[in-house]
Image (tube, grey):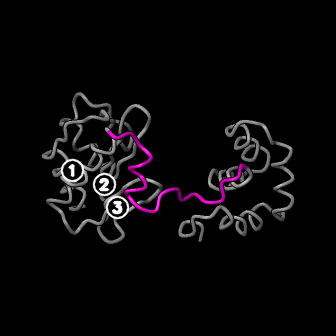
Amino acid sequence: MAGKDPSREAYFPAIEKKYGEKMKYWFAVMAKLEGRKYPEQIAHLRENFGFSQAHANALVMYSRGSTSAKRFSTPADYYKSISTEQAKTVRAIMRAIQSKYPKLELVIAWNQPMLRDGTKYVFGISATKGYLLIAPWSTKVLEDFLPKLDGYKVNKKTIQIPSDWKVDTKLLLQMVKARLAE
């Protein structure tokens, strides 16, 4: 339910059921927390009421005026939200992959551009203020490619690259091939 509907309200029936109070009660709780920072509000709901991260986030963000988790409808919308340099690099990465794997569909999921094969996510990318993160959507693929990622900062699920990265098409295609073979 909540995964398909990007509205924050999609979580409300589950919140009422799981935590035993109507939304009016939870809005009153949030009113008392008004002016506090996001992490404090989340922590309050989790520690005092046992909220899950997803439910706490939905309530906090709704209370702050964000009624939908969906920010971008298309990749073009996403590209407008990042620097010109990053948008150029992201486009080049996606083009490099789709030139070899044209059946992969470029979609926005979790407010980031992703390539998927049917319902299976294959590759994703996100932008931060100072760098890009690429993800082969598989910890196994990431682990298998560690020897080829020397010089990159590798996190649990992502690889950090510079915003102006010279696209390593060979590396990208090898990772995508490995992910598709899973």
Q: CA distance from mark 2 to mark 3?
A: 6 Å
Pointers 2 and 3 in contact (C-beta within 8 Å): yes
10 left or right of 81 in image: right
Residue at 30 percent across and 33 percent down: it is: 162
Q: Residue 157, labelled with which disc?
A: none
Q: Residue 121, labelled with which disc?
A: 3
Pointers 2 and 1 in contact (C-beta within 8 Å): yes
Q: Position of residue 104 (x, y in %)?
A: 25, 65
173 left or right of 80 in image: left
Q: Position of residue 68 (x, y in %)?
A: 61, 60
Q: Position of residue 109 (x, y in %)?
A: 44, 59
Q: Position of residue 178 (x, y in %)?
A: 20, 55
Tell me the SS state at disc 3: strand
Q: Which residues are magenta?
A: 64-84
Q: Which quadrant, please, contains the C terminus?
A: bottom left
Closer mark to the observer between disc 2 and disc 1: 2
Q: What's under tag 3, amino acid-wise?
A: Tyr
| Front residue (pair 146, 96) | 96
Q: What's under tag 1, amino acid-wise?
A: Met
32 left or right of 11 in image: right
The reply to whether the magenta stretch includes residue 79 is yes
Residue that numbered label 1 is attached to: 175
Tell me the SS state at disc 2: strand
Q: CA distance from mark 3 to mark 1?
A: 13 Å
Q: CA distance from mark 2 to mark 1?
A: 9 Å
Q: Residues within 10 Å of mark 2 (few under 14, many from 20)?
A: many
Q: Main secondary structure of the magenta part?
A: loop
Residue that numbered label 2 is attached to: 123
Residue at 84 percent across and 63 percent down: it is: 21
Q: Is residue 118 above or below residue 87?
A: below
The reply to whether the magenta stretch includes residue 37 is no
